[in-house]
Amino acid sequence: MTPSARIQAAIELIDLILSGDAPADSSVAAYLRERRYIGSGDRRELVERAYAVLRRRAALGWWVARSGAGLEPNGRTLTIAALALLEGWSADRIAGSFDGGRYRPQPLSDGERKLARALEGQSLAHPDQPLHVRLEYPEWLEPKLAHAFGAGLETEMAALRTEAPLDLRANLLKATRAQARAALAESGLEAEETPLSPWGLRLPGRVALGNVPAFQAGLVEVQDEGSQLVALLTDARPGSRVCDFCAGAGGKTLALAATMQNKGQITACDVLPGRLERSAVRLKRAGVHTVERVELESERDPWVKKHKARFDRVLVDAPCTGIGAWRRNPDAKWRLTAERLAELASLQGRILASAARLVKPGGRLVYATCSLLPEENEAQVQAFLAAHAEFAQVSLAELWAQLLPGVPAPTDGAALTLTPARHGTDGFFLAVLERKPA
C-alpha cells in the first residue's frame, strides 16, 4: 500500500469503530478479514494510526471543534488532526496525501484545508483544554474518578491513555516460565519477566502471535499480568471443584487449570455461547482437559440451584465498565453512560448473590472486576457481606503472603486494587469471600 492508501484505510477503520457498537478489536478484525490483501506491515501501521486517534480522541476532537470551522469529528477530520498534532505533518504534506487518487483520500475541502493550516506547528496539549479532555475521559465521570483516585487522578488517567504492553502467561502444563521465554527468544521475541505474577512474560508492544511456534504449541497464552494474579489468588488447588462463573473466552479458566495441574473439575459458565465456543480452541491448544462448558440463560439460571454448595472455589469476574482496560480498549470509554454504570452495578449485585449459592461451606467466592470505581468494587463487596452473614472477607494481604512469598504485596488490606500507574498492569479489583464452615 502507498502511504496515502494507508491513511485512507485508517480513516475507514476509524469510522467503522466510531459508528458501531462492537469493541475496537472486533471491528479491526472484521475490517482486516475482509481485506486479506493488506500486508502485515501495512496492517500494523494502519491499526497503530487508528488506535492513536482513539487514545487521543478527546484532545483531537477539541482541536477540530476549535479550528475546524464547524467540521464534525469523524474519521477524516480526526485523522487530519492526528497527522498534524501527533505526527507533525505540515498542511501542505497533508493536502498532498489527500489527492483523490485510487485508494487514496479525497481532496481536502475548504474547511479541512483551514483545519490543517490552523493545526500546523501546534502541540496536542493546550492550556485551554479542560482536565477531562487533556486526560481523555468522559466529563460526566470526573467526580467518580476524582473520588476513586483523589490526588492521583492525573497520574492514573495519564497511564490509562497509554498503549499497554503485551503480557503473556507461561502455560505451566507445558513449560516453565524460563522455557517459554527461551522459546519466544528463538522467534526473535525478547520477553521480560513480569514483576508480580510468577507466570508472566511481557513484550513491549503489539506482536502477531499467530505464527509464533511457542504460541502455536500452547506454551504461552495472552493474559494481562493483573488477570493472571486474579487467577492465582483464587487459590484453585489440584483435585478441587472450581466454577468460573463469567468465563468469557476462557483466559482465567486456562490459568485456573494450570494451577490445578489439570486435576479436578472446572466448570466454565457464560450467558454468551459464542464466548464459550471460542474458548474451545484455546483449551485444546493449552492441553486442558478438565473443563466443562455450561451456557446459562442468566445469572439466575436453574443450573445454579441444581449445583448449590458443590464448589470449592467460585470465581466471578463480573461484567463491568472496563475502566481498568482503557489502555487496550480506548473506544470503550466513549460508549459508557451513567445509565449503563447503574445497570452494571445492579447486575453485579445479582451475579454475586446468585453465584454465592454454588460455594460449599469452607469454600471461597472470588469477586473481580477490571473497573476502578468504588461502586463496582468495594461497595459491591460491602453490600454482599451485609446481606450474607455466612460469608467473611479474607485478607488479601495475608493471602498474598501465603501464595506469593517473597514478592512484596501491592496491598496491606482486605482487598486488592491494581492500576497501570502503580503496578504496570491493567486496572483490577479483587476480593475473596469465604463461606463459613457448616
Image (cartoon, grey):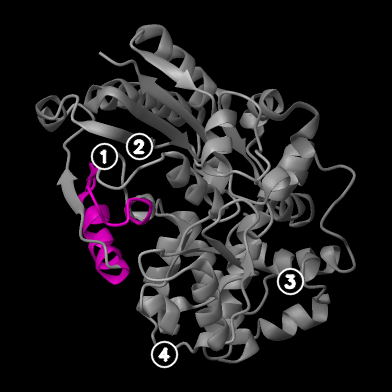
Q: Which residues are magenta?
A: 257-286
Image depth: mark 1 or mark 3 in front: 1
Q: Earlier in the sequence, mark 1 or mark 3?
A: 3
Marks 3/4: CA–CA distance: 25 Å
Q: Residue at x 30, y 65 (%)?
A: 282
Decide: few, some or many residues near mark 3? Use Cα within 10 Å; few <14, some 14-19, many ≥20: many
Side of 240 where 372 appears, left or right: right
Q: Earlier in the sequence, mark 2 or mark 1?
A: 1
Marks 3/2: CA–CA distance: 45 Å
Q: Quadrant of residue 28?
A: bottom left
Whether residue 284 is in magenta: the answer is yes
Q: Amino acid at mark 3?
A: Leu
- Which residue is the site of mark 4? 37
- Which residue is the site of mark 2? 315
- Which residue is the site of mark 3? 83
Q: Residue at x 56, y 44 (%)?
A: 404
Q: Earlier in the sequence, mark 4 or mark 1?
A: 4
**Residue 426 visible in image:** yes
Which of the numbered marks, if any, corresponds to residue 7? none
Q: Amino acid at mark 1?
A: Cys
The answer to the question of whether label 2 and label 1 lie on touching residues, with beta carbons closer than 8 A, is yes
- Which residue is the site of mark 1? 243
Look at the numbered disc 4 and give the secondary structure of its residue.
Answer: loop
